[in-house]
Amino acid sequence: MTAAPHTGQIVESGAPGATADPVRHLRWRSEDDTQALARRLAARPLIGNAYLSLHGALGAGKTTLVRHLLRALGVQGRIKSPTYAVVEPHEAPGLAIWHFDFYRFDDPREWEDAGLRELFAHPGLKLAEWAEKAAGLAPPADLAISIETTEAMERNVTLRARTPTGRSLLQGL
């Protein structure tokens, strides 16, 4: 039997008196916890037009979270990582989804050449791994998800809401 995910509490970050981004800290003890968060995110009405950035070292669980989220949203078929293609489009019932992986993104000209500005302007869910490599080009993420692996192979997860959409997503988790 798998332990239930540690749901954490929403805490405010930043200097006193400053407008802070709401933050929630979680601990995942197994992949079941990753899947549970994905299901909760998929159930949020605003997820269909949100931008989520995923941060963490290689092997932290970014792609695993994306796969669970896409399955929870109803994506069928193979879900592959866009590491070499930069973006993989997906469709779920009534929902367009773009999964970006900026790990190999080195030249800002690629942003325009690949039509990424247009993709980010379209309605739909955008999920970006290694989003920091496209900093200054992509819009601010609604929800930034950072995943760190512990020595015990658990995951410390920080969810930071950066926009009103992100705050709404975070409040519903």
Image (cartoon, rainbow, N blue to C red):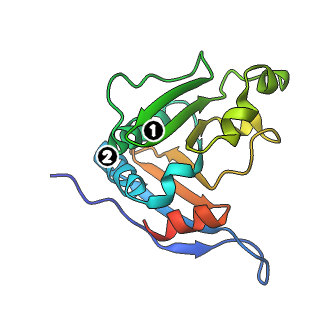
Identify which residue is drawn at 39% across, 45% down: 152
Camera sees residue 91: yes
Q: Which mark is residue 30?
A: 2
Q: Residues within 10 Å of mark 1 (few under 14, many from 20)?
A: many
Could you say which quadrant of the image residue 132 lies in? Answer: top right
Choose between 40 and 149: the one closer to the eye. 40
Instruction: State the image coordinates of residue 31 (x, y, percent, origin top left).
Output: 32, 43
Instruction: State the image coordinates of residue 142 (x, y, percent, origin top left).
Output: 63, 55
Q: Which residue is mark 1?
A: 66
Identify which residue is drawn at 63% across, 22% down: 86
Camera sees residue 60: no
In terms of secondary structure, where does tag 2 sit? loop
Instruction: State the image coordinates of residue 138 (x, y, percent, origin top left).
Output: 75, 41
Amino acid, disc 2: Ser
Instruction: State the image coordinates of residue 78 (x, y, percent, origin top left).
Output: 36, 22
Most extreme residue toward the front, as rendered? 94
Amino acid, disc 1: Val
Identify which residue is drawn at 44% across, 48% down: 155
